[in-house]
Amino acid sequence: MTDKLDDFTNEVKNRIDSNSKNIRLLKAAKKFMQLSTQPKYSYNFSWLGRPIIQYPQDIIAMQEIIWEVQPDFIIETGIAHGGSLIFSASMLELIAACGGPSDAEVLGIDIEIRPHNHRAIENHPIFRRITMIEGDSISEEVIMQVYDKAAKKEKILVCFDSNHTHDHVLAELNAYAPLVSKGSYCIVFDTVIEDLPKGSFPDRPWDKGDNPKTAVREFLRTHPEFEIDKSMENKLLITVAPDGYLRRMS
């Protein structure tokens, strides 16, 4: 049985590796990303009743990472409707039921948590694993609160999905990446902005040349302890986080 599982694992790895060389497939995935952005494709999905505003492929990727890492603390910047918080909390609940950390929790940070979203998250059955902070994720006050919460945690995973400008994301990386445990991930969403045509977000302060991917590139130049997990991107093909799945290696 073990040999068969090893064979299947190797088959999967080979298929993922071949994706990175399949030009036709890569072009089709890129075209889909370009065409699906303006119709707000990612706004059509929910997790346990709350809008999650993610592509299904990235939701599956997060499930795999959370199961692999078994974190006892997940930090998320950007809350919106709360679907991602509910997703992370539900994963932690499942992991606890399978023998993982029983006291694992997720912390969400947002500069504005709208009252109706706050109530909906608080009233959700999985809320017991969730804490929220309303404030600027890169302010000294909020950073200190997060570090206080993380002080007794052993395995930490971090996700950024708030203000997508270069300066803001770089400040988040510098503030919170040090908390990421070895073998865990720092996941930077919406790096795909750099790969889309300039002007794709006319009502937003970010654009090509000023976005999460440009921040990741600058951050990695001075942080060799992190590396891009290209296998994740090659597996998903359709993702809002190309070059955004950062694994801490040391």
Image: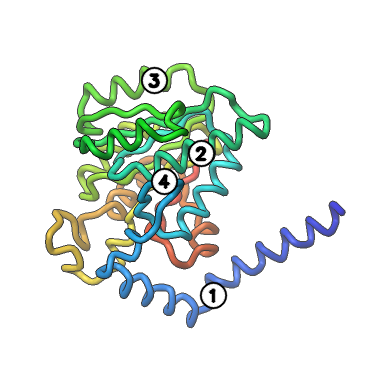
Q: Label 1 to label 4, Cα distance in Å? A: 24 Å
- Residue at 42% in and 30% down: 127
Mark 3 vs mark 4, foreground winner is 3
Question: Under tag 4, what secondary structure?
Answer: strand
Disc 3 or 1, which lies upstream in sequence?
Answer: 1
Residue 35 on image: x %, y %: 31, 75
Q: Quadrant of residue 29?
A: bottom left
Residue 33 on image: x %, y %: 36, 70
Q: Quadrant of residue 207?
A: bottom left
Residue 240 on image: x %, y %: 37, 59
* Residue occupying the far bottom of the picture: 24
Residue contact between numbered discs 4 and 2, judged by CB atoms under 8 Å: no
Residue contact between numbered discs 3 and 2, judged by CB atoms under 8 Å: no
Q: Label 1 to label 2, Cα distance in Å? A: 36 Å
Disc 3 or 2, which lies upstream in sequence?
Answer: 2
Disc 4 or 2, which lies upstream in sequence?
Answer: 2
Disc 1 or 4, which lies upstream in sequence?
Answer: 1
- Residue at 28% in and 28% down: 133
On residue 187, which mark appears? 4
On residue 149, which mark appears? 3
Q: Amino acid at mark 3?
A: Lys
Q: Which residue is mark 1?
A: 21
Q: Label 3 to label 2, Cα distance in Å? A: 20 Å
Disc 1 or 2, which lies upstream in sequence?
Answer: 1
Q: Is residue 55 above or below residue 156?
A: below
- Residue at 45% in and 56% down: 58
Q: Label 3 to label 1, Cα distance in Å? A: 43 Å
Q: Quadrant of the N terminus?
A: bottom right
Q: Label 4 to label 2, Cα distance in Å? A: 18 Å
Q: Amino acid at mark 4?
A: Ile
> 52 or 23, which is in the foreground?
52
Q: Which residue is mark 2?
A: 90
